[in-house]
Image (cartoon, rainbow, N blue to C red):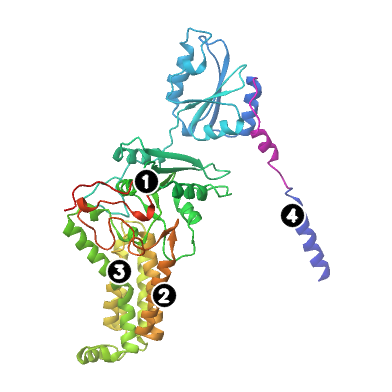
Amino acid sequence: MFKKRINKLMDKLKMDEQYSEQSSLKDINLKEQIIDSSLEKNIETFQFLYSIPTNTDVKIRQIKMSGFPKKVAILYISSIIDTKIIEDNVIKALQQNNDPSARIENIISAESVNILQKIEDILKEINKGSAALFVEGEAEAYLIGAANFQGRSIEKPENEVSLKGPKEAFNEKAMTNISLIRKKIKNENLVVESTTISKRSKNELYIVYIKDLVNNELLQNVKDKVNSFDIDAIQNLSILEELIDERPRSLFPTILYTERPDRATHYIEDSFIVLLMENSPGALILPATFWSFYHSSDDRYLRFLYGNFTRFIRILALFITLFTSAIYVAITNFHAEMVPADLLLAISANREKVPFPSFIEVLMMETAFELIREAGLRVPNPIGPTIGIVGALILGQAAVQANIVSPIVVIVVALGGLSSFAVGDISMNFAIRLSRFFIIFSAGVFGIYGMTAIFTLALFYFVSLKSFGVPYLAPMTPKYISSQDTIFRKIIKNERFRPGYLKPKDIEKKAGDTK
């Protein structure tokens, strides 16, 4: 036995010795240097850094031009660049040049040309889709913008359905998303700042705001937050959202995510800040209040009465999904005297053969409803809705016939579940669904008193929440000068003020006469 243990230990040590520790210190030191005036040395340096020829989509072309006296080399990544731009604006321009003393930046006709010397900066631009032009005898590189990243075209929003508003949605290209915003805000004060937020993947984040509206302290707070990460990669906004959230363990979201350019534009014009990234078909809007998640873009596109009617339906659905199942559990277990005698007899008759208490009944059906909803989301689109509808019908009918649950429980749970779909924002929808289980548990243990207690605690919790220093329930509490767009909205011409809780530089929209 002892000999076997010794042999196992020796085998483990041999396995560990197969892989020696390695370091990338040589690469790091090399990137911090300045490029050489020797073209051959520069080519060797970048061949080493890009692992050429092993790295097959990175190309180096050495060219001797008849119209240019010096030998040049062009380095680019073929999979993310438009080679036609390089051929037409760089190579042909150099070949057709008749002035041997002309400088490179005066010869080529590319849209953007940057001159860099540090290897790390050059690598960053090449990885973003630029072509690097090296010239014999010059200790600098010319970076020509020719990016052509592949992606899908502009499509309709999938999660934020538009009834009357624009049908455009963000896609995974940040430049396309910025273009969609600039199409709506034709203003020289619209600023798009770019910053790198990861060390290894060099992910770019774009901060969009209107400089003569946004509060400078809020803007600096956001910049400090996004620049404080010491992390290798942040590939999309969903990951960034959790990183910059002041209370990432909070049940309720404090940063608004949208995939609609018109919605992002509306918030920018109200002095909010919008974040965009490559690979993310959406935008983050911050700071966000509870009312941001409750509102919908279509509220403003519909007439005043129609928009407020949909808001009334939405707030009613919110309370139905939160409290319907919990009220049923509380009444049947603790407060039977609150129900009319005829209804109480009907409930008792339906539950006569059911072996479980109402609390267990509701819990089982709520869990089954969540399982059906999750299964419908994960299966392919053509059969997803079918599975949801058929699964709910079959399970509900079979459960009633088997006397596992009573028919009224199926009605109560279905009503609460369907009402939850009225909450459009994904993050807030999850928060409401999880909150429903907390309220059901409190009703099962303490009845109506438990429901009241947990609702009161939730209000205290809401008051304690902040999003980048902004109270979660503003402008309802605390009160601020604003358009008072909370549960219901005003007529648009009466919305004179931007949100006062953001402390904008210009609080008045000057929307016209308020009489």
Q: Which residue is mark 1?
A: 505
Circle 3 Cα neighbour tier, 10 Å, few/some/many (<14 / 14–19 / ≥20): many
What is the three-letter code of the residue carrying label 2? Leu
Q: Nearer the viewer, residue 100 or 396?
A: 100
Write down the quadrant of residue 425 in the picture. Answer: bottom left
Q: Which residue is mark 3?
A: 318
Measured Cα–Cα span from mark 1 to mark 4: 65 Å
Q: Horizontal and vertical percent for residue 415?
A: 27, 73
Q: Which residue is mark 2?
A: 457
State whether residue 294 is above or below residue 440.
Answer: above
What is the three-letter code of the residue carrying label 1? Lys
Q: Nearer the viewer, residue 311 or 161?
A: 311
Circle 2 Cα neighbour tier, 10 Å, few/some/many (<14 / 14–19 / ≥20): few
Q: Could you tell which of marks 1 and 4 lies nearer the N-terminus?
A: 4
Image: magenta residue range: 21-37
**Does residue 316 show up?**
yes
Q: Could you tell which of marks 2 and 3 lies nearer the N-terminus?
A: 3
Closest to the camera, between mark 4 and mark 3, is 3
Mark 2: secondary structure: helix
Which of the numbered marks, if any, corresponds to residue 15?
4
What is the three-letter code of the residue carrying label 4? Met
Q: Is residue 25 magenta?
A: yes
Q: Could you tell which of marks 4 and 3 lies nearer the N-terminus?
A: 4
Q: Is residue 360 magenta?
A: no
Measured Cα–Cα span from mark 2 to mark 4: 56 Å
State whether residue 432 is above or below residue 507.
Answer: below
Measured Cα–Cα span from mark 2 to mark 1: 36 Å
Write down the quadrant of residue 136 in the picture. Answer: top right
Q: Nearer the viewer, residue 434 or 476?
A: 476
